[in-house]
Image: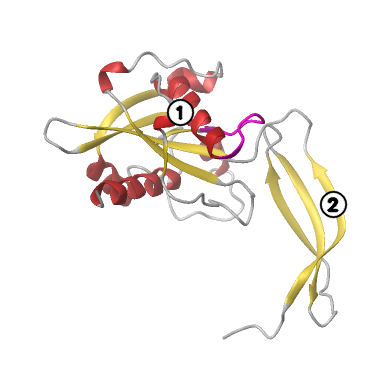
Amino acid sequence: MHSSHAFAGFEVVSDTLHGEPGGYLRIRRLVLRNRDADGSVSEPYTCDFAVRPMGLDAVVVVLWHRAADGRAHVLLRRGLRPALAFGRAAASVPVPDARPGPHTTEIVAGILEAQDHGEQGIRERAAAEALEEAGFTIDPADVQLLGAGTFPTPGSMPEKYWLTTVEVDPASQRASLGDGSPLEHYADTWWCELDRAIADCVAGEILDAKTELALRRLKDRLTAR
């Protein structure tokens, strides 16, 4: 059933930014009215969403290699995610699952910075994150995009994930540099067969959505070859 309204645009009643400058995230609060094609406007309503001053979008990188048995293996990375440990425990309404631990399994990812422009910037950032988080020196030209970008949480943040992949030689891995944050002190990486990693996502052993999506896109890419 379709709405009888024809959306014509937003009317901004107010626009404010909340949170201390210098923080990782801030909250932008808009008070809006919807304007219909017939000229009518809705009652005002509040729209809150997170903004990240250091950069809006992120690159996601599946590092993989072909093992001797012909099967693809992907690099997984475990690190601290305090927001999950504290945020779900303090939820104002009940959550259906137990409080997660402080460690989360993901793949390599990082925030696009001011100098990262267009597809070349995505590839260069992917290479930088592969070195920083996993210890691989790769040529940005070898990075492949896994289809279009995607909005993981369009209701609360305008961030877009750019999914990428690159084939690497496991023997070339060196100690990761990290970004200097204490969050990096407990990070580690390991190889996992691609199908097993996808199955772990379904089973809840890997709970990160961007990781599952990127792994499935890589699987589709390799299957189509």
Which residue is at 69% across, 86% downward?
4
State the colouring used for the structure image: secondary structure
**Three-letter code, disc 1:** Pro
| Relative depth, front residue between 161 and 123 | 123
**Residue farthest toward the left in the current orientation of the protein:** 69
Q: Secondary structure at mark 2?
A: strand
Above or below, comparing residue 89 to residue 136 in the picture: below
Graded by Cα atoms within 10 Å as few (under 14), some (14 to 19) or many (20 or more), the crowding at tag 1 reads: some
Q: Quadrant of residue 166?
A: top left
75 or 185: nearer the eye?
75
In this figure, which residue is indicated by the disc labeled 1?
Answer: 140
Q: Are marks 2 and 1 in contact (CB under 8 Å)?
A: no
| Spot occupied by residue 93 in the image (x, y as percentages of width and height) | 58, 55
User: In the figure, 2 relative to 52: above or below?
Assistant: below
User: For the view shown, which residue lies furthest in the right direction?
Assistant: 13
- Secondary structure character of the magenta stretch overall: loop
Left/right of residue 165 with respect to residue 190 in the rendered view: right
Position of residue 42 measured from the top left corner of the image (x, y, whole percent): 81, 74
Q: Position of residue 140 (x, y in %)?
A: 45, 28
Residue type at the position of mark 2: Asp
The image quarter containing residue 77 is top left
Give SS at disc 1. helix
The quarter of the rendered structure image containing the N terminus is bottom right
Q: Nearer the viewer, mark 2 or mark 1?
A: 1
Q: Nearer the viewer, residue 126 or 184?
A: 126
Which span of residues is magenta-colored? 110-118
Residue depicted at 65% across the width and 35% down the height: 55
Q: Mark on residue 15? A: 2
**What x and y, as percent, mark residue 14?**
87, 55
Residue 111 lies in the magenta-colored region: yes
Residue shown at 30%/17% (left/top)?
172
